[in-house]
Amino acid sequence: MSRAKAYFQKKENNEKNEFRQKLVRHRLTIFYRVVLIVLVIVAASFGLYYNYQNMVYTSYEVLKRVEFEETTTASYMNYNGNILKFSQDGATAFTMDNEMLWNETYEMQNPMVDVSGEYVALGDYKGTMIYVMNTSGKCGEIDTMLSVQKFCISASGMVAAILEDGGTTWVRVYNSSGETVADIKTTMAISGYPFNIALSDDGIKLAISYLFIDSGKLTTTVGFYNFGSVGQNEIDNFVSGFSYSDTVVPYVDFVNNATSIAVGDDRFVIYNGNQKPDSKFEQPLTEEVESVFHGDKYTGLVFLEGSSEAKYRIDVYNEAGNLVFSRKFDMEYTDIVLQGELVIIYNSSECSIYNIQGTEKFEGTFDKSVLTLIPTDSMTKFILISGNRAEEIRLK
């Protein structure tokens, strides 16, 4: 190899090595910048989260207001973040932008309403008609032809109803169009009386609390039915059941598709299972339960504390049965709402809001008598319903 050729080859190799080193340094610089940006974003997010978790709000501002005709006999409910107004004459659903979703007229003596997701079931106690609505309007009418004692609706539009037929009581399941999906015949002598019912959000699972008396002995059975492919392999779609002696279980409900609860006069039970619910947690109760509330992750039990310190106490449990929040309070509450990580206790003039870690986020009063408080997707925004107006507020 000539000296000239060796020189140029060496120079080329040096330039290649120098280029590789520059490329490595450039890539390392980009990598360090990305890591730094990610660390800054994580730190900022953690700071914002920490700041929110510990921030206490002392007042609120009104963002928007909807005025409507005051009706003293009307009641209001949260309808998937919108407003449901109902009375003996009819029901109306509307948004905070004053957009009517639907309006349904009827005549009922004792209207009953159940809401799940975008679906609403409307019916008269001891009547025979149930109206099924969603955000687009009426989906169907269910003519039960029997006296309606109680009903519930799922987020998929399925309806379950307890119907009286002389000495026989039926639990009948319908789809949103009013077609019968399942019939469960019950009698006091054989199965017991269906005290309460609940449907999972997907409409596949049904829970029934049966009250049974045999030779003067009281027993409650909580039974689960599955109307999907799994339940079709079981007799009468019955997939699991649990008996409790010497107790009444008036409350059963689904927290979410995989978790359901039962509250009796001496126990609190959590069941788990997407197809065949099984008893996962059971807590003996030695105190009187005043009321039960739940969101899609937590369940709250309100007890009569009856002490000089406070009249009530709320204990909140997660899906595993762990006690995550406990608070004593004196407020004569209208309602308690468990929304995400918030526990909201309110009446017509007062409101207290806590996060699940126990931090008090807000304690204050309303400037007008409030009938209903509706949470929104934002943890600082709420809708307040009074007799003739709805207000969207933001805590500050």
Image: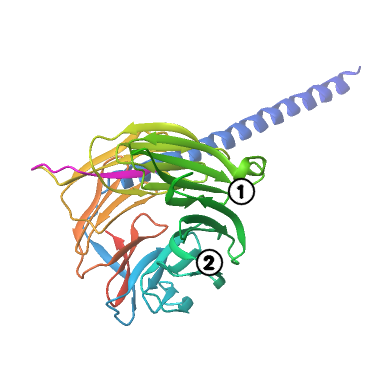
Quarter of the picture holding the N terminus? top right
Report the amino acid beneath label 1.
Phe
Residue 273 is one of the magenta-drawn residues: no
**Which label sits on residue 227?**
1
Residue 232: x percent and y percent?
Answer: 66, 44
Residue 89: x percent and y percent?
Answer: 39, 79
Q: Earlier in the sequence, mark 1 or mark 2?
A: 2
Quick check: 326 left or right of 275?
Answer: left
Q: Nearer the viewer, residue 239 or 321?
A: 239
Query: Label 2, on which residue?
Result: 144
Q: Residue furthest bottom?
A: 69
Q: Residue furthest left?
A: 308
Which secondary structure lies at badge 1?
A: loop
**Snapshot quadrant of residue 156:** bottom right
**Residue at horizontal 49 percent and vertical 42 percent from the top:** 223
Which secondary structure lies at badge 2?
A: loop
Above/below status of 43 relative to 150: above
**Residue at horizontal 60 percent and vertical 67 percent from the top:** 177
